[in-house]
Amino acid sequence: MYKKIVLIIIAGIFVNGQVWTQDFGFGFGFDDVDSGGSSGGFLNSLSVSIGGEVSAAVIGYFDEMIKGADSIVTRDMFMFSGKLNFLAKSSLAQAVINLKLVPALVPVSIDEAYLNVFYGGFDISAGLKKVAWGKADQFGPLDVINMPDASKIFIEMADNTSLMGVKIANPMIHASFRFGQFSKIEGIFLPNFEIVSMAVSSMFDGSSEFLSLVSSPVSDKWIPASMNKLYDNDGNLLMPFKKTDTSGLDYAQAGLRFTTTIGSADIGIQYFYGRMFQPAAKFNLPKNQIPDMNDLGNPDNYPSFEFLFNIYHQAGLDYAQVIAGFNIRAEVAANITEDLKGDDGLVYNPSIGWSFGFDRNLFAGINLNVQGNGTVRLFNDKIGSSGEPFDQYYNLNPNYDVEYDTSMTSTRITAMLSRKFMRDELELRAAVVWGIEDMDFAIIPALIWTRDELRAAFSGGFFIGERDGQLGQYKYNNFLKLSVTYIF
């Protein structure tokens, strides 16, 4: 509902301002708009721009192709999408609507829609928005505002440098105040916790339901390893679930951030109170302790589960500076959950998150970008002794812990080499992601050609490692992608 309200309000700016044109383009002004006989009115200072892109892609999965034509799922093979971006701007405010266009049951969805008002050093915006905090290139520990759609990360990473497109916009109020030459303080309030939904099939009634998850798979190919025990090999849910409603004020979040420049170094300090993206699965005993043999399709005969999104406080620092030709970026964060003793199996332990990276031009026009991300879990010795929710007598297991049999540390290194040719029209790029604890890899090469508004890319993703690893779980999802995009 709030998405419809935001769209109607901002669309009203265009209609009530009598902003009409027969041309489809961008960067047109309104010097000739009649403002009721007065000169220098609001409409005379109002400008509107329209832009966007249209893209088509073909994705082929090796595992499907090897098994033959009968195994190829065409809904995952062809991807057609578009973006339509509207910007209305005056000297005091601007309104932004970014739409996603896809061939689906609901072909138009709002990517972002917000109103931004500025006066002097003050800047206040409200609506559906994406905000990046921290200085890491990709998903550092301080980038906590918008949940990423994990199912699209590798597909997007294959031929894009920015991953903002995989973030889910949140309704928010975002305010900032700039003072001095390089200092800024920001405040943010999110009235709820935006999560991603995916459609899954229930083995009990055969119907399609919506399940709140940390990722929204394009198909069953991209279900996270941490959720694998809840599904069969076809992506069907193995037990009933209780849908998590995160739309109320109980899930409100807020944060403060201060950034400044000291000498040649950029420094940031932030605090955030919110919910963890990674859910914890809580299992519940069946209502009917003895299954009714005449009603085996009734979910009450079976254990069920629900997802809990843990509360946490985060305090963090970030730093960026150019030293000897290296563009260095670093972040560190303390994530304090409610499990201060480390022995609550349904709450993630407190942890320390970190990120360190740099980029540098090497030789012969080659650029190297390296980033390491990781977490260190605190009170690791208090983790429960079981990852099974039920004991042999079909009772809830008191030793069940969502973090059982997981490493105390999680470390991932991403390195990307790139080189441009033909007056920068052609780019050859290769990225490698290495999960150190799991010893698994993702290798993502790409060849990208850009001329004016047209962009074509041939890329791929190849995964190596064991099935229980964060990257190795996708070892049967190796893919090739061919995409063409027109930007207007």
Image (cartoon, rainbow, N blue to C red):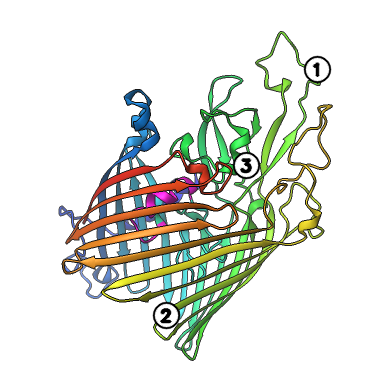
How far apart marks 2 and 3 lie (CA) works out to 45 Å
Q: Which mark is residue 290?
A: 1
> Can you identify the residue that label 2 sits on?
326
| Mark linked to residue 245 | 3
Do the residues under discs 3 and 1 have CB atoms within 8 angstroms?
Answer: no
Can you say whether 433 is above or below 32 in the image? above
Q: Nearer the observer, disc 1 or disc 2?
A: 2
Q: Residue at x 20, y 69 (%)?
A: 37
The region drawn magenta spans: 149-164
Sequence-wise, the earlier of marks 2 and 3 is 3
Quarter where residue 114 is shown: bottom left
Residue 163 located within the stretch drawn in magenta = yes
Q: Secondary structure at mark 3?
A: loop
| Left or right of residue 2, residue 98 in this image | left
- Say if the magenta span includes residue 281: no
**Eyeballing the image, is 356 above or below 487?**
below
